[in-house]
Amino acid sequence: MMTKRQNIMYTLAALVVFAGILFLLDENLGAYPKRIFILAGIYVTLALSLNLINGFTGLFTLGHAGFMAVGAYTCALLTMPPDLKTMNFFLKPIVPFLANVQWPFLPALLMGGVLAGVIGFLIAAPVLRLRDDYLAIATLGFGEIIRIIFTNTQSLTNGALGLKGLPRFTTVWWSWGIAAVTVFFMVNLINSSYGKAFKAIREDEVAAEAMGINLFKHKVISFTIGSVIAGIGGALMGHLLGAIDPLMFRFLMTFNILLIVVLGGIGSITGSVIGAVIVTIVMEALRVLDGTMHLGFMTIAGKPGMRMVIFSALLMAVVILYQKGLMGRNEFTWDGFFQRLHRMSGRKKR
Amino acid sequence: MSVLTTDNLTMIFGGLTAVDDLNITIEKNEIIGLIGPNGAGKTTAFNMITGVYNPTHGRVRFEEEDITGKRPDQITAHGIARTFQNIRLFKELSVLDNVIIANHIHLRHNLFSAVARTPGYVKEEKRIRERSMDLLAEVGLDSLHEAEAVSLPYGKQRRLEIARALATSPKLLLLDEPAAGMNPQESHELMEFIRQIRTRFDLTILMIEHHMQVVMGVCERIYVLDYGETIAHGSPENIQNDPKVIEAYLGVE
Amino acid sequence: MSVQLFFQHLANGLSLGSLYALIAIGYTMVYGILRLINFAHGEIFMIGVYIAFYLVTLFVLPWFAAFVVALGITCILGMGVERIAYRPLRDHPRISVMISAIGASFFIQNLAIVVFGGRPKTFPVPPVFGKIITIGGVNIVSITFIIPIITFIALAILLFIVNKTKTGMAMRAVSTDHETARLMAIDVDIIISITFAIGSGLAAIGGIMWGLKYPQLLPIMGLIPGLKCFIAAVVGGIGNIKGAVLGGFLLGLMEIMIIAFLPSLSGYRDAFAFILLIVILLVRPSGILGSVQGEKV
């Protein structure tokens, strides 16, 4: 059994190696693979934010895309230079108080998270008193309401046209840096007394309440934190893709994140990380099945929708056959890692 | 002042009066029994005292303070803890975590300190862990602290529930059928155990129980319910010889 | 607004309400019997009308035959979804079933995109449904009247089955308690299949009539109406068939009327249902005709 000190040493070493890998990839990856890599990092953050609410606290919510939208739009509107705004808002001019605002990326990113958190907090109060399936539908409803509002507030969000030409702030470092911070935050949170309270609520609400845990307060805390991180994830995504529109944040987006969380293992931080990377890569790889791909000299025609057919089937298969997902509720530990290595090398020797 | 008093406590579900006009008083360090045939309303009484149900009529007072209708977690904060008739452990969490969680109510650090792992928080976390291990040792489960709660045999699960309840630092402990499923040897140990924790933790105890040996052996006073009504109240000797009690349990010739 | 225009809106509202009612019944029956939100129900509705479409255009069946066959195929499909996506998870936590339901919904939707193609198709409306009828100066398409009529007929048949037949009694028994129903020698699995079949059949009828009234078909056409109809079922009282009908009409009328009186809000058309849902869940979660259920501690 490893001591705490050894654990910390190994983790620090891993972080250094990780930073090194990020540097190498940043320098050497082509534009397209790099984009996938950055996207994977963003999905790690998003998956963790959903896992906190759904997996660790046991609240089955389906409105995550709405918080992403709030974060994405807030950050975009704060960082867009005034002339870019004028170009975008040609149908109807932007609201005066935003017209000349231009913030640097970090404060805008954080503001996106904060605003998403505020919306999350406001929604939490009425919605978290509801039972499982009602909670799911209510949060799905709120997610859609947010999207519909964004589609109709022409002078605030540019409505259905969306915002284009967003500055591409999201680099490998931003995406994976925030992912690393989120992982660190989640690990500390889950292992803390508060994290245990969340898990207690998931296991048995009645017992948790009897042991002195204020159900409502803790559910709101979990939900709000989850929405803050979702907002940050949404903002990162917006500034990777360079364009956002309300249609991007429909239920399908929440479904994709849910897919990652389920595949990786509901209630496992490690699972969300691994799931995010795998799903992002495979999603892209399967894009060939979806649309025409221009590979320079040839064009491949695919069947749109095939990708999602496979992924939905995969989701159902996991839930029906393998329920626990990749990691189940287990987490990565250095002890477990080395034990597995020893076992593997032991087999090879024979 | 008495630890717990209920005044005319009544619970009516639609057409059914589950508990009718319950008046009990419990003094400090007493061990009181609440018995009666199945469906007599005993657990309903517990649920009203602990805030799971909002009583239709009547009041509950804990150390002179009116706690009627408060939320369960608020009532636990006042100093009342309970176990459940159908064990409600945090199944997939470890034995130790089950007990640690019950300390959360007294946590003196906020979420930010917890996530940032400030020295103050780390110290408190350590103290909680030690305290929880001590409680597990009390019930003889410290060697199993890493096991998944649901993997424990039935008897040990019951003990874990008690340890968990004790972790909330209660003044009044409500035990719902603690001897259920126990053989005579285990029941005897339980009786000893209850007396011990009463002394060790300066507790007052109210218990629902069907095991008559345990009830008669460890309770100082007993209330008997039947169809929601209090049909008898007194010492174990009085109760054993009360014709109404005998009739309720065995029926009339 | 002129009286004529009002009546036109009213007729449309009743029509839309009927369609919502038909689909909402499917949700409420499945929820009543399995405590499950059949997310895939909206897709069943979509498949129903697509099958009718292909039967008429590709296989050149006369419309009456096409509709009946489409009905049959959709019922089988609905039962199939239950078999594959829900039955294996009967004893699993509710969250797993819900995830499977969502997965099934997306699966069918995207399969439809792959097989049918994402471009809109126009349903060939037989002339009898497209006739313009003029009453008191108001021009209304015949289908607008036919929909409520068919809906009431279907409803009458359904209520007869549920209340007056043995199967219906079995269904009500299973709704209340699976274990006890089994003890009464009821084959719970068959009853569940029948429930899905009926729900899917009604959804198919609703879908076909939807296609006749709003002839543009898209593979994603089931998503939003599906959600709205679930909301209608919740509003009326989930698990309660009359509640689903009430909810459906309420929602349909509300949607048309709000647009009629406040055209500037037409962009928010789909949001009304969600807002109504939130309001109902906060004010009276059991729904208008629903009954409250507690948990034993």
Image (tube, grey):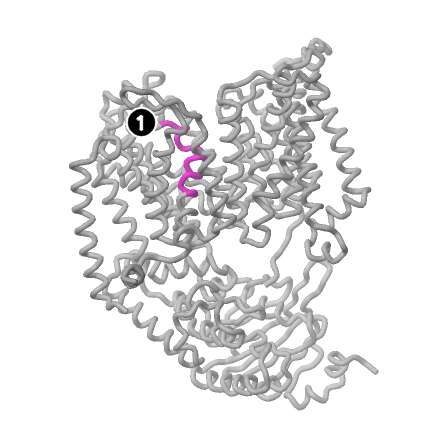
Can you say which quadrant of the picture contains the C terminus of chain B?
A: bottom right
Label 1: which secondary element: strand
Residue A247 counted in the magenta span:
yes
- The residue that mark 1 highlights is A243
Residue shown at 61%/61% (left/top)?
C296
| Magenta: main secondary structure | helix
Name the spot of residue C249 as percent of width and height, x first.
66, 30
Give the left or right position of residue C154, taking residue C223 as reference: right
Q: What amino acid type is highlighted by mark number 1?
A: Ala
Task: Judge whether B11 appears above or below A47 on screen.
Answer: below
Residue A143: which quarter of the image? top left
Residue numbers of the magenta segment = A245-259
Comparing C69 with B240, the one in front is C69
Residue shown at 28%/39% (left/top)?
A111
Residue shown at 59%/72% (left/top)?
B6
Name the spot of residue C142 as percent of width and height, x first.
70, 15
- The answer to whether residue C18 is visible is no
Residue shown at 64%/39% (left/top)?
C79
Comparing B29 with A132, the one in front is A132
The extreme right residue here reads B253
Name the spot of residue B166 as percent of width and height, x first.
45, 75
Task: Judge whether C84 appears above or below B61 on screen.
Answer: above
Residue C81: which quarter of the image? top right
Dot 1, how many residues are within 10 Å of its Cα: few (below 14), some (14-19), or many (20+)? Answer: some
Give the left or right position of residue A13, taking residue C236 as reference: left
Residue B72 counted in the magenta span:
no
